[in-house]
Image (cartoon, rainbow, N blue to C red):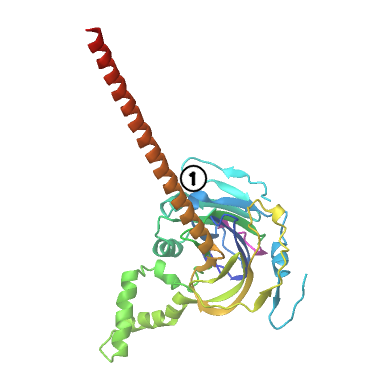
Amino acid sequence: MCIISKEVKSVSKTQILVAVDSKKERQLVVYSNKIDNFIPGNAMILPVPNPSSVKFHNLYTYTDIFNDCNKMVYKKTDGFKGIRDGKITITNSRSRTLDVIDVGSYKVSLANSLDDLKNIDKNLFNLGNGCEELLSRDYNNPNFGFIICSLDVRNKKYHPFGYSHQILNDELFIPTKHYHEDGSYFPKKSYTKGFTPTKYAFYESAFNDVSNNNSFNVDELNSAFEISQFEDKINNEEWDHEIFLYNATKFTNNKIKSDYIWNKKNAIEMERIDFDFGVLVNFEKYNINGNFENIDLKSSIVGIENVNVEKKEEKKEEKKEEKKDEKKEEKEEHEEKKAEEEEEQNTRKSSCICM
């Protein structure tokens, strides 16, 4: 699942690794999926918090990272089965147009805000009205930007690519919301025939009138019935995900449970990714298949409480040191003033003796 600007035949086999750095200040996202696309200019869009802090990680030399992730877990019913940044090339740097860089299988642009999306290279990316409305509605937040990835016109399993950014509000953000222009999020004709949120409310009201045995118009009923058919899909979608959490645990906005157990080993070749992985203390895998709520997932950072306590202690110590420095300065000023007064008194005494 992901946000795709136009229609596609299918999206499947999404794999995501989310990791926390040693300072618990940045998160890494490694992303891969399979997309059967037939529209030129189609794009995959990944919302990202703190876009100004984004760094891309090209995994063209580490395409089997998810195989290594799977070596670190075993299914609860199976029993124990123990066991760098790439080159980034600027391909477009025209004035007022977002740069396009090569990251793994993708040509990628980074928009720092909703307004910045207007500056995409329209020769490469085609964002439909429906996609733009979705982004404007669900990510109208100054903390969010967007990674835009060009899709090839074919059925393709995409090379894993990675990016990291500063963590927002002590929670890991996992881009899993789904949309593509085929009626799975909004009716396709809604953007070609003026189907606006206002009209949605109007048709919803018409449908409620029908439910309450009130009078109704046939056209209104048809539109309301159309809404009833896709309304569930606004909040639910078919998932086909493998999600791996490195030093993170569970989802804070979903009760999905894991059927896997970490075997206490670390098979990830961390030296091949330019990211400051912390010492591994927890690793989880979630295999999410079926109909679930259509949202971006969020996860808790393992040990963040201790880090916050340490930060509070550090701030306390800093305040203590500041107070000590202030007292020291006050003492020095007092001693200087006292010395000046004594010197002035001595000068007066000397003057009196001379007279």
**Residue under pointer 1:** 97
Quarter of the picture holding the C terminus: top left
Callout count: 1
Residue sitting at the far front: 353
102, above or below 29, in the image? above
Q: Quadrant of residue 60?
A: bottom right
* Residue plotted at (62% across, 50% down): 102
Q: Amino acid at mark 1?
A: Thr
Q: Position of residue 311 (x, y in %)?
A: 49, 55
Task: Residue at 59%, 44% (x, y): give it.
Answer: 91
Towards the viewer: 259 or 158: 259
Residue 222: % across, % down:
37, 82
Instruction: Name the quarter where the N terminus is drawn.
Output: bottom right
Residue located 67% across and 75% down the image: 261
Is residue 50 visible in this depiction of the protein? no
Q: Which residues are magenta?
A: 149-157
Relative side of 156 to 341, left or right: right
User: Is 92 in front, or is 347?
Assistant: 347
- Residue 254 left/right relative to 269: left
Tell whether position 292 is magenta. Answer: no
Under circle 1, the secondary element is: loop
Residue at coordinates 74% horizontally, 81% vertically from top-left?
79
Residue 168, position as x, y percentages in the image: 47, 58
Q: Is residue 150 shown in magenta?
A: yes
